[in-house]
Amino acid sequence: MKRLGIHLRLLLTASLLIAAATFTLGGVGIHMTRQFMHQRFEERIAFLAKYLALNSEVGVLINDRAGLRSLALNLLGEKDVARVHILDNHNNSLVDLSRKVPRPHAMVETPVIFKKTKDENILFESGGYSSNSPFEQSPPALENHIGKVRIHFSTHGIDLLLNSITRRFMWASIALVVMAAFTFYLVSRSIGAELKQLSHTAQQIGRGDVELRARPGKLPETRTLALSFNAMLDSLNTSQENLAKVNRAMMKQKALAEMGKFSLMVAHEVKNPLAIIKSSLDMLKADLNLTSDETMVAYIEDEIRRLNQLIESFLQFAKPAKPTLREVDLNRMLGDTVERFQIMNENVSISMHLLPADRQVHSLVDRDLMIQAFGNIIKNAIESAGDDACITIRSEVDEGLAVWRVTIGDNGPGIDPAVKSQIFEPFFTTRSKGSGLGLPFSAQVCKSHGGYIMADNTPPSGAVFTVEIPLRRDDGENADTGLFTKPSNEETNHGSHPGRGR
């Protein structure tokens, strides 16, 4: 005999358990529902009987059969009421009305009570009733049974309703069992298919399809297994990408190192002949009584100066100097840098506005390197803005981050988004006479001080460079601004730098 597989075993076991639980709970629920509905139905009829007895008090007392009949007719109009019988205290029938309703019947009996206070009884007794206090509570009422009310009602309607509920519940239970069994069949059947699919995916990935991912299953277990499998693959891909980034960074560093060696060699080979050319030009100027106003002489001197600056930039970037840290007034240092550019461009239509922080800020930095770095940024802003350039330099202290922040904005065309990520790369330039080393050198200086530099565009036009330099103690650790910022008794604008550029 062939044994049942685990799939059929699970299906049969689950079906039996579901059926047993469903019908057991259904039977208990139906029994409790029947008791509850019968109780509420009887309570309703009892309430109607009490209401009729209360309204029949006067009619029974004075033997008002017409009034009692009217009350009985009103009650007989209620659904399921079969008979209304009102009797006096001697069981004499006062009103007896009935109608045909389906059986079975049940009956509720309620006494008709006449209530009177004790005052009414003792009022006519000898001596009467007297009270020592006007605030004394009235005596309790005395109850006399003067009759009774009987209501016969049919339980046929409630029985039909309960039978209908029972049948519907049975059909619903059967449907639920069938649906549960079918659902369990599909779920148990899908387990094997999902595991097979996961195995097939692993085989394909093993053949080299590293971008393939397992499809999450419908069941929590297979879904968790597939997600864990995918997470492992993502982690492997991330590790490979990080390794590739490290390799690219190492190759870039190696290229920069080779470039630095080449730059040193070229600078050394060019600097000596350039010095000879400059000396020869000076001798020719002296022998021939030439001045710098001569066109060709001016061209030669300008090209010698440009080549010399280019060589200096090569040397600075290829062999960066280690920062010599000392305590510096950062706002004053920035003001000195701006003042140099204002003096250099005082005959040009360039507007420079310096808005320093409202207090002195002291930190450990290399003053010369920082002046060169900010000078390169300001020079780049002036060249980008062109004629009628308007440069705004603003500094502030971020006490939460313990950094000194400087923003340098211009009114030029801004930075082309296509090359924005390349402006700090060595030798990248968009100008015909640019070396592509100014901004990379500034970024190098900021990094050597533990800070950073970033560039962005400002609406409607223009670019803004943001430099953040951490404030440092004498031991080289980041300091909170309370130790390095102090109110200034001098001019916080460091002279009249903002006014000079206007």
Image (cartoon, helix red, strand yellow):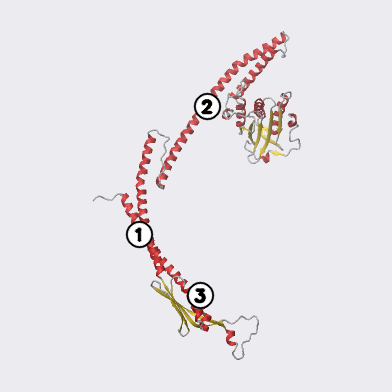
- Quarter of the image where the C terminus is located: top right
Q: CA gap, disc 2 to disc 3?
A: 100 Å
Q: Residue 421 at x, y = what percent?
A: 57, 30
| Residue found at the far front of this picture | 66
User: For mark 1, what is the residue?
Assistant: 20
Which residue is found at the position 47% from the left and 36% from the top?
238
Foreground pick, 102 / 481: 102
Badge 1 density bin: few <14, some 14–19, many ≥20, Cα 10 Å? few
Regarding mark 1 in the picture, which secondary structure is present there?
helix
**Disc 3 residue type?**
Tyr
User: For mark 2, what is the residue?
Assistant: 252
Judge from the rendering whether residue 501 lies leftward or rightward of residue 224; answer left or right: right
Q: Residue 113 at x, y = what percent?
A: 51, 81
Judge from the rendering whether residue 277 lies leftward or rightward of residue 42; answer left or right: right
**Disc 1 residue type?**
Ala
User: For mark 3, what is the residue?
Assistant: 51
**Disc 2 residue type?**
Lys
Occupied quadrant, residue 301: top right
